[in-house]
Amino acid sequence: MKLSYYGHSCFSVEVNGKHLLFDPFISANELAKDIDIQQIPADYILVSHAHTDHILDCVAIALRTGAKVISSWEIHEWLQAKGVHNTHPMNTGGKWTFDDFTVKCTVAQHSSSFADGSYGGNPMGFIVYAENQSFYYSGDTALTLDMQLIPRWADLSFAVLPIGDNFTMGIRDAIAAAQFVKVTHVIGVHFDTFGFVKIDHHDATEAFAKESLKLTLPAIGQVVDI
Ligand code: NI
Ligand code: MN
């Protein structure tokens, strides 16, 4: 499975030759200025919550590519009002099978409002069940005991977890999350983008290694083979 990292919490995974793009926030990310949103392929866009640092480029990419956007009911309605018609609303706990994969929406302990303060529905994470490998993207969240349910639902190959602290889990809690969901490989996201989430890469990687876990902190533009 190939994972391309576009900075902050934006990444895409190829499943059955289709590109699943998560939480597109690129054009206002100083660190991602070499990434051109016009060039990013997408067949599906999964949006975890309505905060700007997860949804900013969603409309532009959805309109250009025609990708189906999977998100909360409230984000779906917001997108429809903006002329994005290929959407699929879901909510926490729900599961749906699309042509190329299945998604289950998980609890995220966070908040979810649009830039104007309006309600964005529940923040969520996603379990993606693909043909050969399943993975979990937690979205922005605190460490939560709900994560202990995830091994009941999926035998995961890897997890994508926020690691930058302040707004989400930090390093220690991301390690505990990896243990709850029973993965040994974590792709860290939501780090370094702005001052509040800067991390020491070496310390983070070492802390994971001490627990026999592999942490990948991809460079922006990097493609990780998993
Ligand atoms: Ni957020
Ligand atoms: Mn965020």
Image: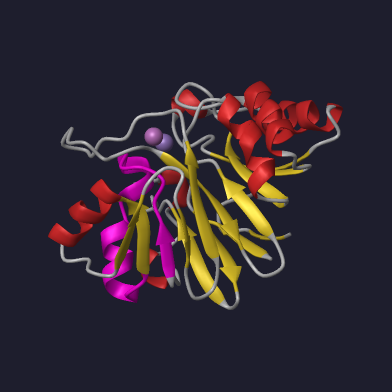
The quarter of the picture where residue 178 lies is: top right
Question: Toward the viewer: 43 or 123?
Answer: 123
The quarter of the picture where residue 110 lies is: top left
Query: Which percent across, then down, holds residue 22?
Result: 46, 55
Q: Identify which residue is drawn at 47% across, 70% down.
A: 98
Would residue 8 be visible to someone looking at this image? no
Q: Is residue 49 left or right of residue 93?
A: left
Residue 55 lies in the magenta-colored region: yes
Q: Is residue 213 above or below residue 19?
A: above
Position of the N terminus by quadrant: bottom right
Write down the region rendered in magenta. 44-67
- What is the residue that sits farthest to the bottom in this orientation? 17
Question: Toward the viewer: 137 or 37?
Answer: 137
Query: Which percent across, then down, holds residue 20?
Result: 50, 65
Q: Is residue 108 left or right of residue 52?
A: right
Would residue 77 be visible to someone looking at this image? yes
The quarter of the picture where residue 115 lies is: top left
Q: Is residue 111 above or below residue 19?
A: above
Q: Is residue 122 above or below residue 3?
A: above
Q: Identify which residue is drawn at 41% across, 46% down.
A: 48
Position of the C terminus by quadrant: bottom right
> In terms of image quarters, where does ligand 2 lie?
top left
Question: Toward the viewer: 103 or 140?
Answer: 103
Residue 49 lies in the magenta-colored region: yes
Q: Identify which residue is drawn at 75% across, 33% down.
A: 205
Tally the marks: 0
Q: Identify which residue is drawn at 38% across, 50% down.
A: 25
Q: Is residue 193 left or right of residue 91?
A: right
Tell me which colouring the rendered structure shows. secondary structure
Q: Is residue 51 above or below residue 35?
A: above
